[in-house]
């Protein structure tokens, strides 16, 4: 974060009445998003905080006819003790020192009424901010069903601030909440009740550290307040400490060590926790009554089945099968429809335009590119519909609970399972779904290995190569078909490579303290449909607007490389052939088919003479160790926008036109016939087919995935890294496959 | 004294101490309400044997056995 824009929280600048900001904060699984949506409706927008990957969600909250304020949704957190830049966002926003965020006027803290003890831990920290705090005790109905008796008024008088029991999903008591926010905005008083009673010794240590830090940072236009000093002193190795260390260097470290030395009589983190829980106990005493014997809830009964070693695993497998099928198969009709619409659009627009570069740009560049963006929407929307439902009803954390062990071998956690599984259909929604992983290193590792899973765009490549070159033979005593086995092997390659890569990333580049995998398993509830649908809408919109523009730009560049220089001499020679056909005595049908062949040969010649052709010839020596000639090389490079493009490109290169698909018999035959330039030697054989398949299994030829990674990681660094490492893997993997194949004598 | 990861489903225990002071695990355990004097019940283990599900303060928490190793407990009858 830049220090120049840091605002002084103690400044008494007049707050404009028309711009009041309330921050919504709470533990995860408290119904925070549901409350946010219920209060703001559709009047919200999502962005990113500069420099980090945390979503910045701001909505408009109408308190009454005159008063409209901004409501900022802060990331769910259990405490203000941040261990990563992402976790620090909530703290910085509350302190008014976050770039691109407004100063906070009132804190709206949401707490799960069925678990007040743990939820009030965070509230104890919020009460120390010297800001007005309004507390929404959510899911009061769930708490009652668990047999809890909660006296909100009693808590309110103990805290000295408003405590409103609500049901966000039913809209219950939201009027009272709005009224409480309004009076908090008018009165601007921090909670009047007692604060956590830290010892004088500890307070003194924090104050003296704060003063020293303030003196050290004064020249840097950076203000350190009490809360930040508190976090620096208590959270050993925490983010507050790391950040000041970077800013102040060795002086800071020495200074902090001496303060910790002096405070060594106080067992620091434990002391904080002890004092805060004592405060929580005091605040809630007499106001919360738990039944001696908690009643068996419906949620417990559901969990007995859903996390049972047998039925739980079975239901989980079934559920994942449905998710996978839905993105893999059920989205196909919609995707086909979109492709068809864009093909038709291209045709009808093209029909009204004159032949030439502009027509080709509009039809083959822009319209095809836009179609290439929108074609991902069905998969993204369907996956996020499932994820939003599973997350909102509480199953998602069970899925992580069930799968954690499996992924811990790769240094990841159970939360990476759904993104990985989704990536078998398409890495774009897979990468987008990593937002459920709070830990940044785990999330980034998942983003980097997810594209190694064999997605549906690789299938056409596998299909054409297997059908053309892998013999139709049964192996293993007739039990397995060699072709099926090869396909299985291609899926296996991705998984087998992903595990060591993930492990390696976590050991090297993304090394750091392994976050403890402590997750709450919340009570099941009916999903809130508004929350679910808004989530789907948000994700779809974000993809089209942010990733879509990059994909479109790539499509246009790739179009230009395959269109230009477009030497008119080539056209002239084919026109002569056309004239000859037209003048011949053949009947119309034969003429038409001959003209068709000339068209295909012409576009083949244009493509071979394009910049891509030149690139292919230039890089041929590089790809020769993979068994490729310049035509395969250029087809592979031209498939940068999307892997499946290679099938159409090969079709054009071998004079069959661009409409050949992976099931085309003529493309198969053309590939089988193809020879090296000026040589009778066959271009393709089993090792070459294997090397192409392995290359496409491991490479990063997908502009959409890279654009999505750019969006999700907020910069070009990680998509570039992803592209580089995957291309290197693909290259050496393909080389290995080719050479092993040749060595085994499959080349003849 | 036993560590939390050795308990069986259905067993209840009182937390006596948490080790690993200063580590992220320690701090997270504390924030999630696992500290001295708190009563926990082991609900179940995940099908693959890890992590484990606990109930404390009236809510359910999933903890890896490797992290639960830090929690020293006294089993309640």
Image: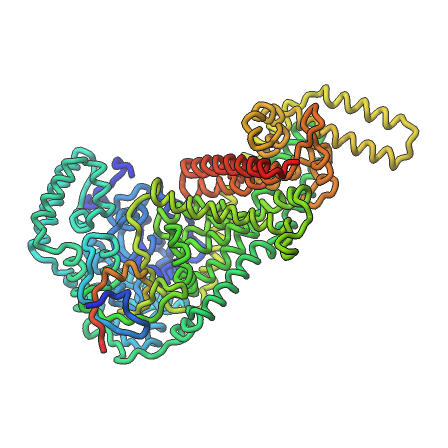
| Residue with the most extreme right position | A585
Vertical placement of residue A679 versus A698, above or below:
above
Report if residue A550 is visible in the image: no
Q: Could you tell me which residue is drawn at 40 percent across and 41 percent down? A: A714
Image vertical order of residue A301 relative to residue A444, above or below: below
Q: Quadrant of residue B65?
A: bottom left
Quadrant of the image containing the C terminus of chain A: top right
Query: Quadrant of the image for the N terminus of chain A?
Result: top left
Q: Position of residue A514 (x, y in %)?
A: 30, 50
A580 vs A112, nearest the viewer: A580
Asked if residue A170 lies left or right of residue A601, the reply is: left
Q: Nearer the viewer, residue A427 or A525?
A: A427
- Is residue A124 toward the left or the right of residue A632 in the image? left
Q: Of residues A367 and A479, which is closer to you in this image? A: A479
Q: Quadrant of residue A556?
A: top right
Q: How many marks?
A: 0
Residue A101: percent from the left, percent from the top?
32, 45
Residue at the extreme top of the image, as rendered: A569
Q: What scheme was used to colour the molecule?
A: rainbow
Horizontal arrangement in the rendering, residue A705 relative to residue A35 (left or right): right
The x and y percentages for residue A400 are: 40, 60
* Residue A122 placement: quadrant: bottom left
Instruction: Look at 81% across and 22% down and name the residue there.
Output: A576
Please provide percent x and percent y for residue A531. 45, 60
Say if residue A109 shows up in the picture: yes
Depicted A147 relative to depicted A635: above or below: below
Answer left or right for A216 relative to A517. left
């Amino acid at each position: 974060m830049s220090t120049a824009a840091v605002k002084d929280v103690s400044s008494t600048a007049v707050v404009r009445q028309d711009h009041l900001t309330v921050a919504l904060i709470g533990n995860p699984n408290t119904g925070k998003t549901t409350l946010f949506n219920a209060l703001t409706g559709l009047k919200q927008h999502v962005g990113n905080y500069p420099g980090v990957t945390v979503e910045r969600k701001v909505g408009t909250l109408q308190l009454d006819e005159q008063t409209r304020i901004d409501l900022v949704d802060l990331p769910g957190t259990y405490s203000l003790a941040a261990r990563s830049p992402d976790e620090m966002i909530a703290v910085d926003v509350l302190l008014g020192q976050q770039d691109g965020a407004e100063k906070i006027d009132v804190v709206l803290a949401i707490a799960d009424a069925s678990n007040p003890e743990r939820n009030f831990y965070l509230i104890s920290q919020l009460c120390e901010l010297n800001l007005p705090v309004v507390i929404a005790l959510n899911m009061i109905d769930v708490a009652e069903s668990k047999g809890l008796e909660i006296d909100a008024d009693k808590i309110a008088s103990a805290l000295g601030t408003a405590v409103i029991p609500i049901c966000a999903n039913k809209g219950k008591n939201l009027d009272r909440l709005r009224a409480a926010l309004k009076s908090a905005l008018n009165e601007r008083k921090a909670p009047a009740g007692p604060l956590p009673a830290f010892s004088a010794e500890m307070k003194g240590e924090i104050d003296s550290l704060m003063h020293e830090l303030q003196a050290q940072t004064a020249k840097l236009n950076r203000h350190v307040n009490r809360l930040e000093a508190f976090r620096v002193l208590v959270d050993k190795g925490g983010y507050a400490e790391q950040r000041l260390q970077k800013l102040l260097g060795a002086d800071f470290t020495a200074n902090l060590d001496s303060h910790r030395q002096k405070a060594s009589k106080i067992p620091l983190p434990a002391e904080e926790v002890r004092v805060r829980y004592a405060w929580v106990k005091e605040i809630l005493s007499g106001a919360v009554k738990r039944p001696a014997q908690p009643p068996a809830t419906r949620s417990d009964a559901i969990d007995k089945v859903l996390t049972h070693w047998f039925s739980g695993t079975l239901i989980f497998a079934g559920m994942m099968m449905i998710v996978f099928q839905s993105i893999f198969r059920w989205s196909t009709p919609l995707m086909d429809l979109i492709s068809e619409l864009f093909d038709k659009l291209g045709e009808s627009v093209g029909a009204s335009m004159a032949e030439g570069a502009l027509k080709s740009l509009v039809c083959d560049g822009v319209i095809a590119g836009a179609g290439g963006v929108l074609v991902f929407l069905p998969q993204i929307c369907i996956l996020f519909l499932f994820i939003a439902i599973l997350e909102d009803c509480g199953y998602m954390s069970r899925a992580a609970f069930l799968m954690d062990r499996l992924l811990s071998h790769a240094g990841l956690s159970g939360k990476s399972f759904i993104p990985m599984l989704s990536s078998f259909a398409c890495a774009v929604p897979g990468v987008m779904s990593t937002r459920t992983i709070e830990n940044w290193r785990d999330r980034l590792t998942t983003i980097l290995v997810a594209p190694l899973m064999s997605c549906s765009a690789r299938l056409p490549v596998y299909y054409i190569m297997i059908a053309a070159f892998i013999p139709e033979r049964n192996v293993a005593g007739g039990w397995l078909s060699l072709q099926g086995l090869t396909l299985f092997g291609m899926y296996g390659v991705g998984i087998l490579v992903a595990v060591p890569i993930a492990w390696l990333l976590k050991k090297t580049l993304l090394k750091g303290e392994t976050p403890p995998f402590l997750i709450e398993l919340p009570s099941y509830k009916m999903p809130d449909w508004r929350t679910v649908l808004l989530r789907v809408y948000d994700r779809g919109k974000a993809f089209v607007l942010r990733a879509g523009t990059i994909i479109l730009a790539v499509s246009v560049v790739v179009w230009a490389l395959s269109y230009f220089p477009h030497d008119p001499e080539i056209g002239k020679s084919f026109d002569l052939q056309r004239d000859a056909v037209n003048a011949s005595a053949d009947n119309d049908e034969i003429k038409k088919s001959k003209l068709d062949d000339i068209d295909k040969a012409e576009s083949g010649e244009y493509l071979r003479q394009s910049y891509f052709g030149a690139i292919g010839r230039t890089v041929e020596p590089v790809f020769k160790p993979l068994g490729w000639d310049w035509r395969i090389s250029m087809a592979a490079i031209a498939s940068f926008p999307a892997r499946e493009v290679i099938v159409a490109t090969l079709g054009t290169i071998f004079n069959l036109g661009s409409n050949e698909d992976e099931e085309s018999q003529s493309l198969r035959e053309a590939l089988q016939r193809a020879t090296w330039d000026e040589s009778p030697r066959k271009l393709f054989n089993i090792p070459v087919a294997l090397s192409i398949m392995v290359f496409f299994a491991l490479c990063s030829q997908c502009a959409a995935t890279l654009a999505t990674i750019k969006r999700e990681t907020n910069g070009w660094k990680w998509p570039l890294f992803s592209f580089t490492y995957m291309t290197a893997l693909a290259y050496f993997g393909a080389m290995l496959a080719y050479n092993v194949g040749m060595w085994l004598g499959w080349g003849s | 004294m036993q560590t939390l990861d050795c308990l069986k489903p259905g067993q209840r225990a009182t937390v006596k101490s948490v080790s690993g002071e200063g580590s992220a695990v320690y701090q997270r355990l504390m924030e999630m309400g696992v500290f001295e004097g708190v009563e926990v019940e082991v609900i179940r283990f995940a099908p693959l044997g890890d992590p484990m599900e606990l109930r404390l303060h009236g809510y359910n928490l999933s903890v890896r056995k490797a992290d639960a190793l830090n929690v020293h407990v006294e089993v309640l009858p």
